[in-house]
Amino acid sequence: MNDCLFCKMVRGEIQPKKAYENERVLAFHDINPQAPTHVLVIPKEHIATINDLRAEHATLVGELYLVAQEVARSEGLGESGYRTVINCGRDAGQAVFHIHLHVLGGRPMNWPPG
Ligand code: 5GP
Ligand code: ZN
């Protein structure tokens, strides 16, 4: 996807502050953090929304959570806890249409979310 912001990060055309990377997954710090730690975990493959996931993506989606766990641990959130969120579509406020798992922590979170 040529004009996708997160695909540009995957290709190295934009350089976010990386938190983790392997062949399939990239994690980087959010530019507008909503908590002391706010990391986005993305698949390197362009998938626009949760609605675009297919059965063959199941392992990849699982890996997003394993990377979230690893990032949370390395950010010191393993014990205190953290929130993971994937926004899907307009009502959820999805702004970047390349699926991303938010990892938020370092402060108490409210429920229900706004
Ligand atoms: P969404 O609302 O789509 O779930 O979340 C998109 C997230 O991407 C937002 O938290 C926003 O701050 C973050 N974001 C948007 N543009 C950039 C950017 O250029 N760099 C980084 N690191 N994060 C970005
Ligand atoms: Zn993309």
Image (cartoon, rainbow, N blue to C red):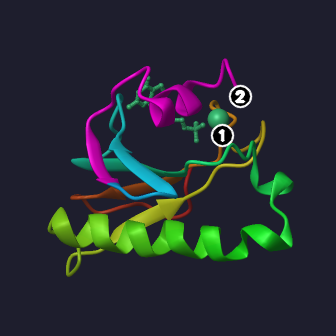
Residues at badges 1 and 2 in contact (C-beta under 8 Å)?
yes
Q: Where is residue 89 in the image (x, y as percent from the top left)?
A: 78, 41
Q: In which quarter of the image is the N terminus?
A: top right
Where are the magenta residues, as a range? 1-20
Q: How far apart are marks 1 and 2 (CA)?
A: 10 Å
The reply to whether the magenta stretch includes residue 13 is: yes
Q: Residue 1 carries which label?
A: 2
For the point 30% across and 72% down, which residue is it?
Answer: 70
Cβ of disc 2 within 8 Å of ligand 2?
yes
Q: Work out whether residue 68 or residue 85 is closer to the camera in this orientation and state it.
A: 68
Tell me what residue is drawn at x 33 percent, y 47 percent: 38
Q: Does the residue labelled 1 lie within 8 Å of ligand 2?
A: yes
Q: Which amino acid does label 1 sit on?
A: His
Residue sitting at the far bottom: 79
Helix, strand or loop at disc 2? loop
Three-letter code, disc 2: Met
